[in-house]
Amino acid sequence: MQEAAVSATDLACRRGDRVLFARLSLALEAGAALHVSGPNGIGKSSLLRIIAGLAPAFAGSVTVHGTVGLLDERHALDPALPLGRALAFWQRLDGAGDMQLDRLGLTDLLDVPVRYLSTGQKKRAALARLLGQRAQVWLLDEPLNGLDGPAVELAQALTREHCAGDGIALIASHQPFHLAGMYTLRLADHAA
Amino acid sequence: MNRIAALLRRDLGRLLRGGSGGALLPVLFFVSVAMLYPFAVGPDAALLARTGGGVIWVAALLAAILPLDRLVEPDLEQGLFDQWALRGISEELAIAVRVAAHWLSFGPPLMLAALLASALLGLDGATLRTVEIGLLAGTPGLAALGVTVAALTAGLRGGAALSGLLVIPMAVPVLIFGAGSLGAGGNSGLALTAAASLVLIAIAPFAGGAAVRAGRD
């Protein structure tokens, strides 16, 4: 497995006819975490999607070494299926990564159809999916939305462990995210 | 290969189970049309036998429209296509697998239901055979067309109604050749049905894949 790295040069993003940010450059090495902060609508999610390769950059270029995992508001779990089977699909696709269901408090919910889960439970299930993917680069879009106090702690601990294992994490959030040695990118500084 | 099998298994499961009756609804709709037709035109056995094959084809086409709104849109909304793209599963592959799953969920059930329909309409053995071969050749094309149009209209307001209207004109060649094989067309009609099907299947992954990508803003 190659060393993870994320870099972007002179990135600009346009939505509709508005340029959200421009001249944004960043470089992250294995083990680094970056908190992308800023108010709603400033382009945090767009930045993550550009880095994921799911949206085109208006200008500039992105290089990502390593596998990419994305956690956003869409949990990508079949609403009609019991949680266990919805997660099993991703396990078949990704191989047998440890989803840490115990720690995420999901073991009692495996028989419950996904659509009956609360927002926070769905978020924790999406975290399990992300863990099972064993991706080197984590793109977390508002990862703390809907999580209660202990779950927020847990999400931060999981991110810390991911980075300690030479992973990279980019966290887009308007909420504070506590992680030792984390870089911060204030997107407002790059607003066009 | 394992990933394709996992995708196919999941897609098929979702389509068979899915909301609003799953795979059963189009089949019930199809049989209802065959059941209602004799009530509407009267119990003239000769007339039913002559026109019944065509009715089966029209019913099959309309039944193929029913599940359109849940072919692509829910997965797009829940971010599955994005997650697949991150894992190196292209939109084209995902759509190709979806076409196969959609056909499996409605083609063979429809062919089984056609046995019942042909009994209701009093078709003879030779006609039934031509109808079944025609459906085998034509339904894959209808499935491919359905998935393509569903991908194109996913995310649009009123997309479900629009996709029905889009499918009908593009399904006309399959219908003409398929129903035509019952009359003078014969085997060449069947061959042309299969040809029209193949064209639709060949286009579907690329058109559908491009539509899914374009749908991400």
Image (cartoon, coloured by chain):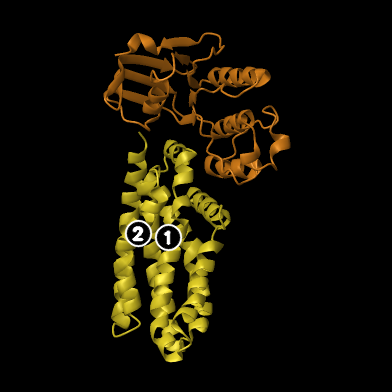
Chain colours: A orange, B yellow
Considering only vertical position in the picture, is A76 above or below B11? above
Task: Measuring from the top left, give residue A112's x and y in whole percent.
Answer: 68, 41
Q: Is residue B125 visible?
A: yes
Q: Is residue A12 visible?
A: no
| Secondary structure beneath label 2 | helix
Q: Nearer the viewer, residue B169 or B211?
A: B169
Instruction: Give how far apart the Cα atoms at labels 2 and 1 are.
Output: 7 Å
Task: Measuring from the top left, give residue B100's x and y in whole percent.
Answer: 44, 58
Q: Which callout, 2 or 1, points at the residue further toward the start of the chain?
A: 1
Considering only vertical position in the picture, is B43 above or below B194? below
- Amino acid on which disc 1 is placed: Ile
Task: Measuring from the top left, give residue B14's x and y in whole percent.
Answer: 55, 52
User: Quick one: which residue is furthest to the bottom in this view?
Assistant: B46
Q: Mark 1, residues whose alpha carbon is within 10 Å: few (<14), some, or many (≥20)?
A: many
Considering only vertical position in the picture, is A142 above or below B1? above
- Report which quarter residue A24 is drawn in: top left
Q: Which residue is mark 1?
A: B65
Q: Is residue B150 left or right of residue A91?
A: left
Q: Mark 2, residues whose alpha carbon is within 10 Å: few (<14), some, or many (≥20)?
A: many
Q: Chain of mark 2?
A: B
Q: Which residue is mark 2?
A: B167
Task: Measuring from the top left, give residue B130's x and y in whole percent.
Answer: 40, 81
- Amino acid on which disc 2 is placed: Val
